[in-house]
Amino acid sequence: MPRYDLFVRDNVIRTIGYAVIPCNWMQIMENSLDPTHLEWLHGRYFQYVFEREGRPQDSWPISKHHQKIGFDLFDHGIIKRRVLEGQTEDCEDWVVGHPVVFPNMLRVGDLGAHSFQIRVPMDDTHTYHIWYTCFVPNEGVQVPNDYPISLYEAPLKDANGKFITDYIDGQDMMSWVTQGEIADRTTERLGTSDKGIIMYRQLLMQELARVEKGEDPMCVVRDPAQNDVIVLPQEENKYGVGDLLSSIAKDWNTRYAPNIDEIILLCKGKVEENV
């Protein structure tokens, strides 16, 4: 298995969330190549959710308009880049960006938490989705060596059968599933903001052609001697929102980790090592 950095990183706290998503895995991957959904699904829609819940929304940065998006091929897939309203091209989100690791992983994060989203096809209409998160403690804080990895399920719907959309990953799942089990692409009209989706489809067809010729596709490693740690690009403070860890407890799938409050305290150095 390729030694991607988050899989082998020291001094982090790991959590693993999972869900069975009742749709084709390509719908999930193509969503990851559509950066502008950030401002609409997770920005404007979240503002609507915040308003209904009476939560403050003035400082929510992801509702800002996209001024520019970009995509670059690299050895392990595609790097996504964006410039939001009020930013310039020297921002981390453009200079560094974050990757879609071919063929089925997304790398995201900021400040004290970095994640892989791993999309595993179960069949044509079901995907086993994994959120693998590494919480990075504050400088000088040491994570207990035997601290357990928590496993939890991220629910798609509530007890009444309604989509849970007051957290980012719930919003994503709702948008994946409501396209239908297999999205009908026969009448789609892709535009300039869909160039990441186009690039991903072209890359997928290119690598499938290599497999048909008996060659290995991108990201296959067979020689252990060539399997050094693969450090992937990732922004560290792209939104400048300060205490992201507290937001993670409410707005991301990790809120369902049974020990999320303790994890945040540990990362901040507020829990003794013998916890």
Image (cartoon, rainbow, N blue to C red):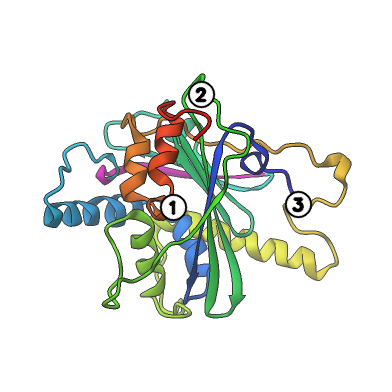
In magenta stretch: residue 64: yes
Residue 202: image x %, image y %? 61, 61
| Crowding near the residue tagged with mark 1, few <14, some 14–19, many ≥20 C-alpha atoms within 10 Å | some
Mark 3 to mark 2 CA distance (whole Å): 30 Å
Looking at the picture, tell me which residue is in the foreground, 83 or 243. 243
Most frequent secondary structure within the magenta stretch: strand
Indicate the amino acid at tag 1. Answer: Ala
Q: Which of the two discs, 1 and 3, labels the residue nearer the N terminus?
A: 3
Residue 70: image x %, image y %? 47, 44
Q: How many marks?
A: 3
Report the span colored magenta. Answer: 63-74
Q: Could you tell me which residue is drawn at 44 percent across and 52 percent down?
A: 257
**Which of labels 3 and 2 is toward the front?**
2
Apparent side of residue 189 relative to residue 57 in the rendered image (left or right): right
The secondary structure type at the circle numbered 3 is: loop
Apparent side of residue 248 relative to residue 201 in the rendered image (left or right): left
Q: Could you tell me which residue is drawn at 39 percent across and 69 percent down?
A: 189
Determine which residue is flagged by label 2. 141
Determine which residue is flagged by label 3. 1
**Outermost front residue:** 274
Indicate the amino acid at tag 2. Answer: Val
Mark 2 to mark 1 CA distance (whole Å): 21 Å
Determine which residue is flagged by label 1. 257
**Which of labels 1 and 3 is toward the front?**
1
Residue 80 seen = no
Q: Could you tell me which residue is drawn at 52 percent across and 74 percent down?
A: 24
Relative to 188, does residue 257 appear above or below in the rendering?
A: above
Q: Residue 124 appears in which quarter of the rendering?
A: bottom right
| Crowding near the residue tagged with mark 2, few <14, some 14–19, many ≥20 C-alpha atoms within 10 Å | some
